[in-house]
Image (cartoon, rainbow, N blue to C red):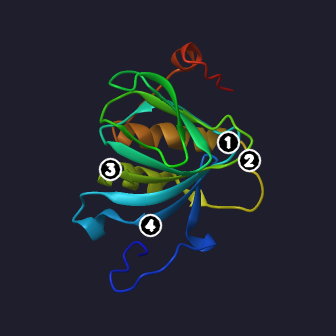
Amino acid sequence: MTPGNHNSLSSPTDDQTFDVFGVQLQFLVAPEETANQSSLYKGILPPGIIIPLHSHPDSEVFYVLEGSLEVYQESGAHKGWQTASSGTALAVPPGVKHALRNSTSAPSVTIAVTQHGLYEFFREIAKPAQAGPPSPPSPEDMQMLFTTASKYSYWMGPPEENAAIGIRLG
């Protein structure tokens, strides 16, 4: 089902694929289709992609369809770095500092379930996907990211905290 289309089933197409700082997202179910309870999207993390340390008030549930994904959680039952392989599901509770990375040579393909706020955040910062490898974000892109993150009460980890868990920024 495509977001906002309640009467038919369809598969996502390239024109429904968006770039969120190197991650390719396809929004599959919008929150308004679930009475603002949840949303569903497909994410493709190319080799070498890193999502730095951050937190938000919405929970996330990931299911790895292909490849593997390294997930760091600062607290909880799955504290530290863990590798989620194809067929693995994992949950990130609300407010938990976490990071993601694909350190393999193959894309990591996931399905994720999130709440309304995270969906709106992604829709606000997403750009139409372009062919070829993603280009580094511009200073304007980074400013927009931090401004939007603040709007949604999301915390973005500073370089020191990312370095402490093995992520080098810049």
Q: In this view, does 31 lie above or below 5?
A: above
Return the x and y of residue 46 as percentages of the image width and height. 68, 47
Query: Crowding at label 1, few (<14), some or many (≥20) Cα neighbours within 10 Å?
Result: few
For marks 1 and 3 on the same chain, the one whose residue lies earlier in the sequence: 3
Q: Which amino acid, mark 1?
A: Ser
The quarter of the picture where residue 127 lies is: bottom right
Q: Position of residue 57 (x, y in %)?
A: 30, 38
For the residues bearing labels 4 and 2, Cβ distance under 8 angstroms: no
The residue that label 2 is drawn on is 135
Mark toward the start of the polypeptide (1 vs 4): 4
Q: Are marks 3 and 2 in contact (CB under 8 Å)?
A: no
The label shown at residue 82 is: none
Residue positioned 64% across, 25% down in the render: 169
Q: Which quarter of the image is occupied by the C terminus?
A: top right
From mark 3 to mark 2, how far is it between C-alphas? 26 Å
The CA distance from mark 1 to mark 4 is 28 Å
- Measured Cα–Cα span from mark 4 to mark 2: 25 Å
Q: Which of marks 3 and 2 is nearer the N terminus?
A: 3
Where residue 4 sits, quadrant-wise, is bottom left
Q: Is mark 4 on a helix, strand or loop?
A: strand
Residue name at image x 42 percent, y 39 percent: 149
Residue, far right:
132
Q: Name the residue under label 3.
A: 117
Q: How crowded is mark 3: few (under 14 residues within 10 Å), some or many (20 or more)?
A: some
Q: Please indicate whether residue 38 sits to the left or right of residue 163 in the image.
A: left
Q: In front: 91, or 17?
A: 91
What amino acid type should be assigned to the residue bearing mark 3? Gly
- Mark identifier at residue 28: 4
- Which residue type does callout 2 highlight? Ser
Residue 138 numbered tag = 1
